Amino acid sequence: MSAQNNPQSAAIESAVAEAVAQIAAAVSVEDLRVVVNAATGKKGQLAAIKAGLGKITDVEERKIVGQAVNDALILVQQAAESRTTDLKRESFAGAIAADRVDMSELALGAAASNRRGRMHLVTQSIERLEDVFVGLGFQIAEG
């Protein structure tokens, strides 16, 4: 900004500091848009300062304040772009984490449900008969 100690410079610096702090605190892209519009939009703080440039009678001071306002707008836009990138990256990382699938679970479940073949009919019948006799109190002796 400018090195002069005029009210416009202080207002510009405070507006930029407030805007950058709000940009850093934004938690979503929509919040970020609201903050940027509040700082740089038609009814924003920097726009009000820029509109007051016509009231400054000294040409050199007007140049300095105008350049400071433009630098402030660029600084706010750069901070907003950086934060937008960070928010999109965080959103993408969250979406990836939510969509993550444990492949070992799928592989084990698929292996159990996709076994090929069946036991022979005679073997199935023998096992059923063994279950019936065990239920009646008999013991199964093999050999």
Image: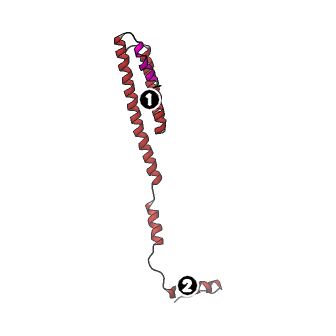
Question: Which type of secondary structure does the marked residue at label 1 adopt?
Answer: helix
Q: Write down the region rendered in magenta.
A: 45-55
The mark that comes first in sequence, 1 or 2, is 1
| Residue 89 badge | none
Would you name the residue on which mark 2 appears?
127
What is the CA distance from the residue labelled 1 to the residue labelled 2?
A: 75 Å
From where the camera sits, is residue 73 visible?
Answer: yes
Residue drawn 43% across the image and 20% down it: 12
Above/below status of 86 relative to 108: above
Residue drawn 47% across the image and 31% down it: 35
The 10 Å Cα crowd at callout 2, few under 14, some 14 to 19, many 20 or more, is few
Question: Which type of secondary structure does the marked residue at label 2 adopt?
Answer: helix
| Residue 20 badge | 1
Residue drawn 46% across the image and 68% down it: 110
Depth check: 101 or 132 in front?
Answer: 101
Judge whether residue 48 is colored magenta: yes
Residue 54, percent across and down? 40, 14
Judge whether residue 121 is colored magenta: no
Q: Is residue 66 left or right of residue 29?
A: left
Residue 87, percent across and down? 44, 40
Above/below status of 111 relative to 53: below
Q: Amino acid at mark 1?
A: Val
